[in-house]
Image (cartoon, grey):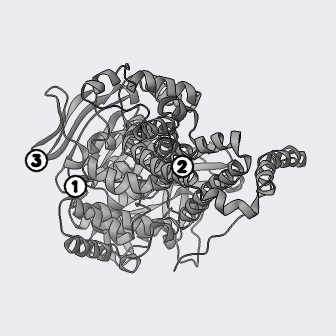
Amino acid sequence: MSRPRRRHRPVQVGLPRWVYVPATLGALFVIIPLLAILVSIDWPNFVPLITSESSLAALLLSIRTATASTVICIVLGVPMALAMSRGGFPGRPVLRALVLLPLVLPPVVGGIALLYTFGRQGLIGQYLEVLGLRIAFSTTAVIVAQAFVSLPFLVVSLEGALRSAGSGYEQVAATLGARPTTVLRTVTMPLVLPGLVSGAVLAFARSLGEFGATLTFAGSLQGVTRTLPLEIYLQRETDADAAVALSLLLIVVATAIVIATASRRLAGPL
Amino acid sequence: MSNLRIQARLAARGVDVDLAVDEGRVLAVLGPNGVGKSTLLLLVAGLLRPDCGRICLGDVVLADTDAGTFIAPHRRGVALLSQQALLFPHLTVAANVAYGPRCVGLSRSAARAAADRWLAAVEATDLAERKPAQLSGGQAQRVALARALATEPRLLLLDEPLSALDVTAAPAMRRLLRTMLRARRRTAIIVTHDLLDALAVADDVAVIEDGRVVEHGPAREVLTTPRSDFAARMAGINLVAGRIVRPGTIRTAWGTEICGTGDLEPGTDAVAQCRPSAVSVFTTIPHGSPRNVVPVSIAEMEVHGETVRIRADTQPDGGTGLAADVTATAVADLEMEPGATAYFVVKAQEVQLYPAGAVSG
C-alpha cells in the first residue's frame, strides 16, 4: 500500500539556456573519443586479438588484483571513514588531508613512495626481506599499489554518506539500549550502504585502471604484474589493433560495473 | 522520595539546572526557544556530558563529574522521543518497535510479540508491516512512542513530541500520551512550549529561562499563579478551576458553571481552558444563546497591534483574571474602561476541560 511518489518538475530559475552550449561540448568531449575507439576497431580480428594468451592473462590478473584491492579498501577504509566522520580525536583535519593525498598525487610518485616503503631497501621492506617476504615486483605489489591509490576514493565517498546521514538515528538506537557495535551493525551501516557500494565501485574502477604506481612498484611481468592497462600500453608499441581491442574490453568492463551498480542503487532500500 | 535528580551545568549551552522528578510523575519543562530545555534531556539521556554536576535515577548515579562516573546512553534505561519520529528507514514498523527488546537480548519471536503488544497499545497494529516512509507524521510519532516504551524505560524523555505534527494529528497524539504517561504512572519529562501539552500530560511544571529553573511546582499552581514572565505569557490562556458537575460542565467554587468539551466523569476536579481570542465581550447579557456567559469586572486593557486584550479581575480563588482579545473598534463601540462590568461569552466547543487529577487541589 505505498503512496505513489509524485515527481515534481519545478521551474529552474538558475539555468540560463546558453549553459546548454558548453555543457553539450563537454559531453561530446567525453563521448567522441569513446566513439573513436569503436570506429577504429579491427572487427574481423577482434575476438582473436582479445583472446590471445597475453591478453587473457592480463585481463584475469586485472580482475583478480582489482577485486583483492577493493576488499582491502573496504576492510581498511570503512573504519577510517567511521573514525574521520564520528571520532573525536585531535588533529583530525590534518590526518584527513594526509590520508586523502593519494587522490591528487601522480600515481608514479605513489609507486616510488611504495618502493621506498616496501622495496628491498625500503623503510619496512628491509625488515620483510629479513623475514623472507619480498613484495616489490610481485602480484602482491600490484594489489598494494592499487589499494594505495584507490583507498581515498572509498573513504571520501563513505565519509560523505556518513556525514549526510547524521547521528540522529544512532542516538535513538543508543537510547533504545543498543551498544556501539550493535548501532554500527544495525543502523549506521545499513543507512550508508549506498555510499559504501558507490565507494567500492569507484575503488574497483580506479584499481582496474591503475597504471603508474603499478608499473613503478610492480613492474610489467606477463601473468604476474602485467595488468590490462600495462598490456594495452605495451601492445600499442607493437600491435596498435590489439591495443584498441583491449581498450574496448576495458570500456565494456567499466560500463558494465557502472550499469550494475546504478540499477542496484535504484532497487536498493534507500 | 525523589526518583530523578538533575544537578548539572553545561557552560557551552548556558545551562545550569537543578531539578527533581518524583517517581511516577510527569514533569513538563516549559520555556522559550533556545533556553536549554532540549539540552536538559540530552544530559539525562547521556548524549551530552555535563561540565560539572550529578544526575541520579533512583539509586543509580548516571553521571557524576566529581566521581568521574558516566554511564553510556545504552545502559541508562532512559528512552528519548524527539520532535522527529526518527524511525529507522530500512526497517519495518514492527522491526522498529522490536529493536529495543532485541537489544536487551530477547529472541526474535519474543521481541516481535513485545512489538505487537506495544503497537496495539498505541493503536497502530495495522501499520506493523509498513516501512516508515509510508507513514504520516502522526502515525510515525505513534510508532516512535511504541518503540520508546517497548524498551520498558525507567524514565521517558519527550522533546516537543507534538510540535512537528499538524493540527489534525496533534490532539490524538496528545490523548495517547496522556493515557500512556499519566494513566500508567510513568516517570517522564516532556519538553514543550505548548500549554495544552503541559495541561494534558503533566503533573508538575518547571519553567526554564536562560538555562535556569525559574519556577517549579504542581502544574495548576504554576500555570494559574505564574511568577515568571514566561509562565505569565503562557497563562495568557484562560484557566478556570472547578469540579465537573455534569458531563461537559464544570462548576467553580464560587458557583459559575462553564460548558466545554472533554470526556470527564462528574465529581472530577478539573480545569477549563480556552484561548482569549475565542472570548467575545458584551456590555449587556446576550440573550437566546447556548454559550457560556461569565460576568466580570474589567481590570485592565492592553493594546497588542490590532487587538486589545481585556483582562478581568483576579478570580475568587486567586487564579489569573480571565482575558479576552477583541478588536480596537469593538472596544471603542462598547465604550469599555477598567472598572466597568462586562460579560465574557465563549462557545462551549472553544472550551476544553482537563482533569486536575494528580495536580494539587
Q: CA distance from mark 3 to mark 2?
A: 77 Å
> Viewer-nearest of labels 3 and 1?
1
Residue designated by label 1: B187
Residues packed near mark 1 inside 10 Å, few (<14), some (14 to 19) or many (20 plus) = many
Name the amino acid type tagged 1. Thr
Dots 3, 2 in contact, CB < 8 A: no
Name the amino acid type tagged 3. Met
Task: Give x and y (percent) for residue A170.
Answer: 36, 49
Labels 3 and 1 in the same subunit: yes
Q: Is A37 on the left or on the right of B222, as rendered?
A: right
User: Can see residue B171?
Assistant: no
Name the amino acid type tagged 2. Ala
Q: Is residue A33 above or below residue B228?
A: below
Q: CA distance from mark 2 to mark 1?
A: 68 Å
Residue designated by label 3: B1
Q: Is A207 on the left or on the right of A91, as rendered?
A: right
Q: Is residue A117 above or below residue B339?
A: above
Task: Give x and y (percent) for residue A76.
Answer: 37, 40
> Viewer-nearest of labels 3 and 2?
2
Residue designated by label 2: A58
